Image (spheres, helix red, strand yellow):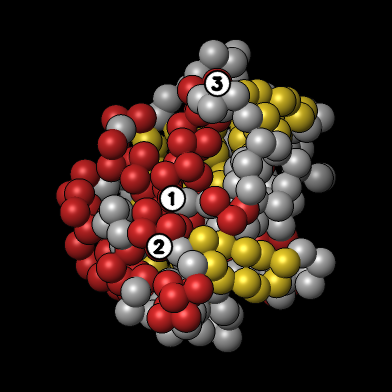
């Protein structure tokens, strides 16, 4: 006899909202019919809601009966409009996330506490929100998260001197389709943030995952945060993986880790 699912996932719904600056943010809502289970999943710097590793995280929540909300920041390569990637900062990524959560709070499926999950710049953003509003958070999953601006300056991921001198860093997207120009002001903004300053507020269950060969947010930085977390916590390393989990087997492993963790929170 085949076991039937205990919940139903309704057809995905895209919604266009305006952020605090009047820019257009495209939000994807994938609603489950199980009440009291809500998760927000946030992409990283230059990412978007359709990337394979972001979808792997979202699917882990969906398969666990959660309504999932994801979106594209205004300052990235995605469907949202009104900003440019070159102006991306933790501050404006965080602001878009706050505006999405504020909009969600007026929807019929909204509930508290909810789960926050984010990758890289999304990882520090969701953790900052959890430090500010711990009573709203059921559980937290900062994946390959930026820990602080100061620690970012210690990595070998960028030629920081050249970036600062030129005022702009030019790279390509993973698919090679878009040139990525990012101002040095991004790093100046990043220096304002440090998750370790208020880590004692993160008393909720926390899941951390990082690639074994992650350069921008390396395992040793993740361990600094993990060791100071006061509550129930897990830290996993994806063997052979870099900062983003582009390989299908890496995405599958992340998905399985998130699903297993959700069974414990």
Picture coordinates of residue 69, whole percent (x, y)? 62, 35
Secondary structure beneath label 3: helix
Q: Is residue 136 visible?
A: yes
Q: Is residue 159 above or below residue 30?
A: below
Picture coordinates of residue 4, whole percent (x, y)? 76, 38
Q: Marks 3/2: CA distance? A: 29 Å
Identify the residue at horizontal 70%, vertical 72% (top origin).
Answer: 172
Side of 152 relative to 251 (left or right): left
Identify the residue at horizontal 43%, vertical 58% (top origin).
Answer: 185
Secondary structure beneath label 1: helix
Q: Is residue 101 above or below residue 84?
A: above
Closest to the observer, 180 or 44: 180
The disc at residue 90 is: 1
Q: Marks 3/1: CA distance? A: 20 Å
Tally of marks: 3
For marks 3 and 1 on the same chain, the one whose residue lies earlier in the sequence: 1
Q: Is residue 231 visible?
A: no
For marks 3 and 2 on the same chain, the one whose residue lies earlier in the sequence: 3
Closest to the observer, 253 or 155: 155
Crowding near the residue tagged with mark 1, few <14, some 14–19, many ≥20 C-alpha atoms within 10 Å: many
The disc at residue 52 is: none
- Mark 3 or mark 2, which is nearer to you? 2
Closest to the observer, 141 or 17: 17
The disc at residue 187 is: 2
- Which residue is denoted by mark 3 in the rendering? 103
Identify the residue at horizontal 65%, vertical 73% (top origin).
Answer: 171
Picture coordinates of residue 58, whole percent (x, y)? 64, 48
Quadrant position of the C terminus in the picture: top left
Q: Is residue 217 above or below residue 82?
A: below
Side of 50 relative to 187 (left or right): right
Quadrant position of the N terminus in the picture: top right
For marks 1 and 2 on the same chain, the one whose residue lies earlier in the sequence: 1
């Amino acid at each position: 006899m085949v076991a039937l699912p205990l919940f139903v996932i309704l057809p995905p719904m895209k919604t266009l909202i305006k952020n605090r600056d009047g820019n257009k943010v495209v939000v994807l809502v994938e609603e489950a019919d199980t009440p009291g289970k809500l998760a927000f999943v946030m992409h990283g710097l230059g990412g978007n809601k359709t990337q394979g590793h972001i979808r792997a995280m979202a699917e882990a929540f969906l398969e666990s009966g959660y309504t999932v909300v994801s979106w594209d920041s205004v300052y990235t390569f995605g469907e949202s409009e009104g900003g440019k990637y070159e102006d991306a900062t933790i501050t404006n990524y965080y602001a878009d996330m706050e505006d999405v959560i504020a909009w969600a709070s007026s929807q019929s499926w909204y509930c508290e506490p909810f789960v926050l999950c984010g990758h890289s710049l999304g990882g520090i953003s969701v953790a900052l929100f959890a430090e500010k509003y711990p009573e709203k958070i059921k559980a937290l999953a900062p994946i390959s998260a930026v820990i602080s601006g100061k620690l970012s300056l210690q990595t070998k991921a960028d030629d920081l001197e050249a970036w600062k001198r030129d005022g702009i860093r030019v790279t390509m997207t993973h698919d090679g389709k878009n040139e990525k120009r990012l101002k040095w002001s991004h790093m100046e903004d990043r220096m304002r943030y440090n998750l370790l300053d208020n880590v004692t507020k993160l008393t909720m269950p926390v899941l951390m995952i990082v690639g074994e060969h992650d350069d921008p947010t390396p395992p040793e930085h993740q361990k600094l945060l993990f060791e100071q977390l006061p509550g129930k916590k897990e830290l996993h390393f994806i063997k052979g993986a870099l900062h983003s989990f582009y390989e299908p087997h890496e995405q599958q492993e992340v998905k399985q880790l998130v699903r297993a963790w959700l069974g414990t929170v």
